[in-house]
Image (spheres, rainbow, N blue to C red):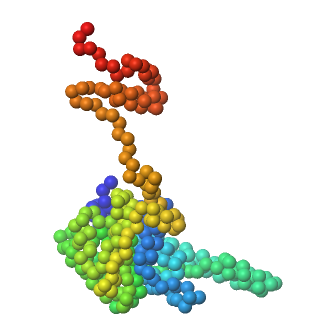
Amino acid sequence: MSRPELTGHASLFYNAKEARKYDSSSRMVGIQREITERAIELLKLPSPSPREGGTPSFILDVGCGSGLSGQVLEEHGHVWVGCDVSRDMLTMANERIEEKREASQNNDNESSSDDDNSDNEDESMQDGQKRKTEPSPGDLLHQDMGTGLPFRPATFDACISISALQWLCYSNSKDQMPKRRLMRFFSSLYNVMRRGARAVLQFYPESSEHAILISECVGGIVVDYGNSTKAKKHYLVLSPEWAYKAPQGLSGMEGALLNEVRGGVRVADKDPRKAGKRSEKAPRKIKGVGKTKEWIIHKKETQRKKGKDTRKDTKFTGRKRPTRF
């Protein structure tokens, strides 16, 4: 399957049909949730809980798509603004936000009617708290990140981007230069971030040249599951600290257990008991000699395991015949 970046502009690829397909795929929803959880972990944001004296962080979601990553940010108690170049994807995200706001209004109306009709005020308050649904704290903006981010300076506490940064490495017209679009994006991102804010941008580079092109800015790349071809994830972590060192990526059993706790996609590790043990190789034919006795016995055992009729082994199995009678 070819990469979607090679088919043309993102707004053309993610049309209404692809946007609906993307948003309804349980596999994509699980992967997006896992990556967003990892990005929030790398941001190291303060707790938004009022009990701990914290406040929700104002986070920018670049390439928000259908709002799957924004939904995870809401679950963590943060306020977010998402921008994307595809209007169809933003339509899907807006539907999710409007549904949550309507559900919140309906719950408020039901709780108020319960308070009027109930004899016991304490019970009505408890029932209202159980059914209470908060409106979505997210907002959307149609914007191509390659042209810059149109926000006021020092607006956001953090920034995430899930599977969108690699689109800037491709040009769809003669006037689009990947390096120039990347520099425009990173300079505007630095401008809209507050002092001390961090950004975690997850991307899928097609080649090492794309990874080098993206990593030329200040920061470090964190690679999770580096030995896997399907589960490998690249995270560009940007920090204003000059002495900042990127954390180590997840690998092996550590990443598998963490994903199991999150409920996301689990990457199975090899059995540690079998580590370092080489599998027994089947006997091979020897040139100039032909089929050896070991090779014939191994072949017959393989045929028996497949359920095929095979002659029994005798003392004549693999016996060399004389060259002449």
Rendered image quadrant of residue 268: bottom left
Q: Is residue 141 visible?
A: no
- Quadrant where the C terminus lies? top left
Residue under the image location 46 percent in, 32 percent down: 305
Q: Position of residue 106 (x, y in %)?
A: 63, 78
x, y percent for residue 168: 27, 71
Q: Nearer the viewer, residue 151 or 61?
A: 61
Q: Quadrant of the N terminus?
A: bottom left
Residue 34 lies left or right of residue 203; in this view the side is right
Between 45 and 114, the one lying in front of the other is 45
Q: Residue furthest top?
A: 325
Residue ID at (41%, 53%): 275
Image coordinates of residue 303 in percent, x first then y, are 42, 29
| The furthest residue to the right | 119
Is residue 171 something one can see in this rendering? yes
Q: Is 210 or 219 nearer to us in this picture?
A: 219
Q: Residue at x 69, y 81 (%)?
A: 128
Residue at image coords 38%, 86%: 197
Residue 82 picture location, percent across and down:
41, 78
Q: Is residue 274 above or below residue 320?
A: below
Question: In the orientation shown, which residue stands out farthest toward the left?
Answer: 174
Report whether 144 appears left or right of 38. Answer: left
Give the image quarter of residue 144: bottom left
